[in-house]
Image: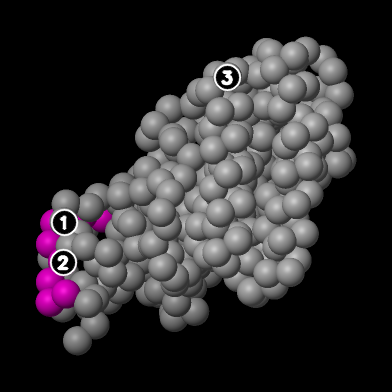
């Protein structure tokens, strides 16, 4: 989660947000949600609202703090605490809504937040974990957009990454591969939009790490736990870590076809010696031009079975 109520440096804040995405890449299990989550066009970045220069209103910060807290505590089934957070949200929303209108908040954003608050009341009353977390994240998405109206002290895009990271967790729990991939595309576009700010704050390392993480998330999403995977290409990346860095596995189906791995560079920080790529017998894998980063020599492909 993002740190709140402090002016975090750009590079540090993005690292925190991308950390949330890293947790999202791990996935989780659970029931499907009745909500589709924040609407994000793949590969696009919406313009940020024009700032009034005013400080962030306390009720708006309260909405964000309680929304994030809900997502943290709902999995533990602490419904008494959930009820307290929801009450705080209802109070903060009643205080902020008229101020938001005065401050120039778009009607569509306010309407979406009102819908999220209503859904949150209903889902939490029914003790519906998935619906409660989804409504909380929908509300947080609106808050993040309205932060653009105020003197936030950090790019709005950082908050957007936080929302996207949580949404990936929810979509992965619902085993909705299409939505997971859509959110990863949105995160990729958002990181790209933040690059100029990061470059001005010595953030090149964070940019590189973000790109590598997003690539890994895209690859991780291409698993047949959701649906058959075909025509997947992994190209021109710097890859490292894990047991074997890339593991193409047709689980749980008998085959996986059309997987291509080309012109990637591999580090040596994996648990199994010289194991850049591990491929299972049921995978049709095409490789070319993949090399070790330190020597430029061909990276090793291991066939399992």
Q: Is residue 98 above or below residue 58?
A: above
* Number of marks: 3
In the rendered structure, the answer to whether residue 193 lies left or right of residue 301 reads right
SS assignment at label 1: strand
The image quarter containing residue 293 is bottom left
Taking the magenta stretch, the answer to whether it contains residue 192 is no
Q: Position of residue 134 (x, y in %)?
A: 52, 52
Where is mark 3, residue-wise? Answer: 107
Looking at the rendered image, the disc whose residue lies closer to the viewer, 3 or 2, is: 3
- Residue located at (41% from left, 68% from top): 31
In the rendered structure, the answer to whether residue 202 lies left or right of residue 178 reads right
Q: Earlier in the sequence, mark 3 or mark 2?
A: 3
Q: Position of residue 224 (x, y in %)?
A: 24, 67
Q: Residues within 10 Å of mark 3 (few under 14, many from 20)?
A: few
Our reading of the magenta stretch's main secondary structure is strand
Find the magenta span and give its range.
Answer: 253-261
Q: Position of residue 247 (x, y in %)?
A: 33, 70
Q: Is residue 252 above or below residue 166?
A: below
SS assignment at label 2: strand
In the rendered structure, the answer to whether residue 15 lies left or right of residue 23 reads right
Residue 52 or residue 202, whichever sits in front: 52
Where is mark 2, residue-wise? Answer: 256
Residue 169 visible, this orientation: no
Residue 241 visible, this orientation: yes
Residue 102 or residue 165, whichever sits in front: 102
Where is mark 1, residue-wise? Answer: 230
């Amino acid at each position: 989660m993002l740190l709140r109520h402090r002016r975090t440096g750009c590079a540090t804040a993005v690292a925190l947000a991308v950390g949330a995405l890293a947790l999202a890449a791990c996935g989780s299990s659970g029931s499907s949600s009745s909500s589709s989550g924040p609407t994000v066009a793949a590969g696009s970045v919406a313009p940020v609202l024009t700032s009034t220069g005013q400080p962030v209103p306390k009720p708006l910060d309260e909405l964000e703090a309680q929304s994030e807290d809900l997502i943290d505590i709902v999995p533990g089934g602490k419904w008494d605490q959930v009820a307290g957070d929801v009450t705080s949200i209802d109070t903060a929303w009643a205080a902020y809504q008229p101020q938001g209108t005065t401050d120039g908040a778009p009607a569509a954003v306010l309407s979406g937040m009102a819908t999220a608050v209503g859904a949150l009341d209903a889902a939490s009353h029914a003790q519906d974990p998935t619906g409660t977390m989804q409504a909380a994240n929908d509300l947080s998405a609106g808050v993040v957009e309205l932060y653009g109206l105020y003197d936030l002290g950090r790019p709005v895009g950082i908050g957007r990454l936080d929302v996207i990271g949580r949404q990936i967790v929810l979509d992965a729990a619902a085993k909705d591969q299409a939505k997971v991939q859509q959110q990863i595309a949105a995160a990729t576009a958002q990181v790209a939009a933040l690059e100029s700010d990061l470059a001005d704050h010595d953030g090149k390392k964070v940019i590189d790490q973000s790109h590598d993480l997003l690539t890994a998330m895209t690859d991780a999403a291409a698993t047949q736990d959701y649906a058959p995977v075909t025509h997947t290409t992994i190209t021109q990346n710097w890859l490292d870590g894990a047991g074997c860095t890339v593991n193409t596995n047709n689980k749980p189906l008998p085959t996986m076809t059309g997987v291509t791995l080309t012109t990637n560079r591999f580090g040596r920080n994996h648990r199994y010696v010289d194991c850049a790529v591990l491929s299972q017998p049921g995978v049709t894998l095409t490789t070319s031009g993949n090399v070790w980063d330190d020597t430029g020599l061909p990276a090793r492909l291991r066939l399992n079975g």
